[in-house]
Every structure is written in C-alpha cells, then in structure tokens.
Amino acid sequence: MHYTKEEIENLSKVKRLNLINSISGIKPANLIGTISSEEQSNLAIFSSIVHLGSNPALLGFILRPTIDVPRHTYQNILDNSCYTINHVTAAHTHQAHYTSAKFDKHISEFEACGFTEEYLFGFNAPFVKESKIKMGMKFKEAIPIQSNNTVLIIGQVHHLVIPENVMNAEGQLDLDKADNAGISGLNNYYSLTKVANYPYARVHELPKFNSKQ
Amino acid sequence: MHYTKEEIENLSKVKRLNLINSISGIKPANLIGTISSEEQSNLAIFSSIVHLGSNPALLGFILRPTIDVPRHTYQNILDNSCYTINHVTAAHTHQAHYTSAKFDKHISEFEACGFTEEYLFGFNAPFVKESKIKMGMKFKEAIPIQSNNTVLIIGQVHHLVIPENVMNAEGQLDLDKADNAGISGLNNYYSLTKVANYPYARVHELPKFNSKQ
C-alpha cells in the first residue's frame, strides 16, 4: 500500500493518529515523574524519549502543544527543573498506559494507576519504585519546534539507577533482563528479545554481504 | 547500582557511550537513504527517529556534530531536500549495522552492505528494497541544539509504503508482522513481540489498579 502526503491528510483523524504514530518503528516506554510546588506528584507515559549525547549525558522528549490541554509535567519541570524518567517493564504496561488519561491536576497518577512514589538521593521529583531502570533529570533547554508548535525538552542525567545484573562490563544494558517494554503507535505494547550483538563497525572489517539476498 | 552525574562523567569513554546510549530504552532501527547532487547514493542507520506530530505528519532525527566527521546524509538532505526512512527488519540487522562504518564519500553503503536501491514515485532519494515499511521525506527544518551542538532534523512524510497485512482497519501497525527490529545502545538488536493492546485511556474507564503490587 502507498499513501501520498495528500492521502495521509485526507485520512480520518483517528486512523491518521494511529498510523503516523506507528511509522517511526518501535518506541521506548517511559514514565516521567514530577512534583509541583504544592507537592502534588504527577506521572505520565512518554514514547518520545530520545538520546541526544553521552558527554554530557543528555536526553530529550517531545511535548505536544500546550494550548488545548494543560501539561502538568511541563509546568512542574519549569517550576522546579527536576524530573525522573523511569522505564516501563512489560509487567506494568497496563498501569503505565492509563497515566495518559486526562486526570485533574489534584489527582496523582501514581495513586490512580497503582505506582509507588520513591524519593531518592534528596532529588526533588518522584521515582517509580516499580521501574528497574530510572533516572533523575535536570532541565537544560526547551526548544520550540516551529513546524508544528511542539517543544523539545532537554535534560541532563544527574542520577542513574540500574539493576546490577542488567549491565555488562562494557556498560551495555540487557533490556531483555530488565523486562523492558516498547510501544508502537498509541496503544500497542511489545516485549523485547535480543537477537544480535555486533562489534563497532569498521570499514576494514566489513563482512561480505551479498547484495542480492 | 547508582551513578551520579559526576560518576557518569568519570566513566571510560567506551563504557559511558555504551551506557548512556542504552538508557532511553528500546530505539527504532531505521535506515536513511539519500543521494548527492553527483548521484552518489548513501545509506546510514539511525536510532533517533522520533514522532513529532500526525497532522502534518512529521518525524525528526538527531544528527551528531559535523565538526569531526563529514556527514554525507546531512549534506545530501540540504542539497536536494529529499530523504527516505526505511525500517530495518530483524533479518537485516547485520547489514544495517555496518552502514555505520565510516565509508568514503564515493562508496555507496547500499552496495557495500548488500542493500538494493529502489527509486519510487519519481522521488529524489533511494528507498531500501529490503525494508517493508518505508517513507519518502521532505526536509522542513534543522534545529540546532545548544546543549551539545547536535541538530534536530525535521521532515514531512510525502510517501508512505506499508505491506497490506501489517495495518489494521484503525491504522495501527503490527510491528511483529512487519518483522521490525529495535536497537539498544550502539550494538544490540532486538526482535519485538506484541503483548498488549489497550484502548484510548479515559479517566471514567480507569481499571482498578492495586498500588501495592
């Protein structure tokens, strides 16, 4: 099947949302935890966390326009500059999915969706106790994206928590062992199975690939 | 295990690269295809493709600094504003991984790594014949990220190719059926297994979650 730009524009809203949210491939499942100046905690699932660089250790994520819906996560980050990113395990996808419902500001998604707040290292944002891999992030930069009025939020890793058995000696994480989940589109959750590990790719070590396979 | 910002900074370069490239969770495996004004094709694996919005249908990806290494993909996009994004299947991760080697500008990674160029719809960039899900993208915006001198490249979907059996009536894609691959860090490839599909999350339809599980 082939869709042109115009055919995509003419799809029904729901079909377009589902389809275009799926076309980037598998997405990471993460929960972002924050707390307001009034000490109201907030938790929301995000599938747009993206690696920006390792030194400094920076991650970004995309926020939708703030015109139509209040964005508690964003307001809390602007207010106290701390937030946590917590990996969703395959066992917690149902609860994690429901953090995307539009709860009132005075409702904590931790409680509503059955997650446990965890305060660690004197950091001013709640971690998710149920997550195995989690980070304490400090806000660095908010970059407006003119093409569609979204915002790229950039933060630096200040705390990183990893179960000992998930990391090897070279620092590689085994997402299998961490029971990590992935997301496709808005509704579909995937488990992960490691199929290959390849060395750093060097031209003079190139395997012989047959172009007609 | 707990790492602070300072402990991350003090890791060896390789360990820090491996670790921090892994901490966002699973990443999509995509090949970006371009062609230069001299009609030299280029193919490179990217794990940073991110959904920005559905209407217009926009995807972004992160480019590393251009100071140390020439970035053929970026130059070709700036020159003719067309590029393709092609999903990597689990069967092609080995070949796809090796497109990250630093080939000379006159070498096409299509040929070196055994992929087949496919020119479709009169679009001025090569698609990957071996990929099942593929897009023809037109460049919209390049946003410099001051925090680490990377660049967010934004493009709009002008052509979208999907196998018929992979999409359901609501526009959701089954990445399982598309044999899609995911990446962790720089070297580890994963296959995907669908574990759940949940409805759009509404507060008044919230399941009863037990917070002490």
Image (tube, coloured by chain):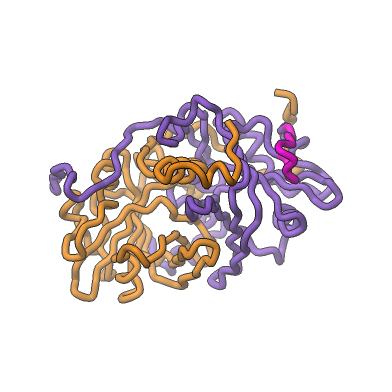
Chain colours: A purple, B orange
Q: Quadrant of residue B1?
A: top right
Identity of the residue drawn at 44% across and 42% down: B12
Q: Is residue B58 shown to the viewer in this render?
A: yes
Vertical arrangement, residue B159 with respect to residue A14, above or below: below
Question: Where residue B176 sits: x, y (%)?
Answer: 40, 37
- Residue at the right extreme, as displayed: A38
Question: Where residue B75 sits: x, y (%)?
Answer: 32, 71
Q: Quadrant of residue B80?
A: bottom left
Give, as a single range, the part of the protein colored magenta.
Answer: A116-126
Vertical arrangement, residue B180 with respect to residue B85, above or below: above
Is B73 one of the magenta-colored residues? no
Helix, strand or loop: magenta stretch: loop
Identity of the residue drawn at 41% across and 60% down: B64
Q: Nearer the viewer, residue A29 or A178?
A: A178
Q: Nearer the viewer, residue A181 or B44?
A: B44
- On the rendered structure, is B113 left or right of A162? left
Q: Is residue B24 shown to the viewer in this render?
A: no
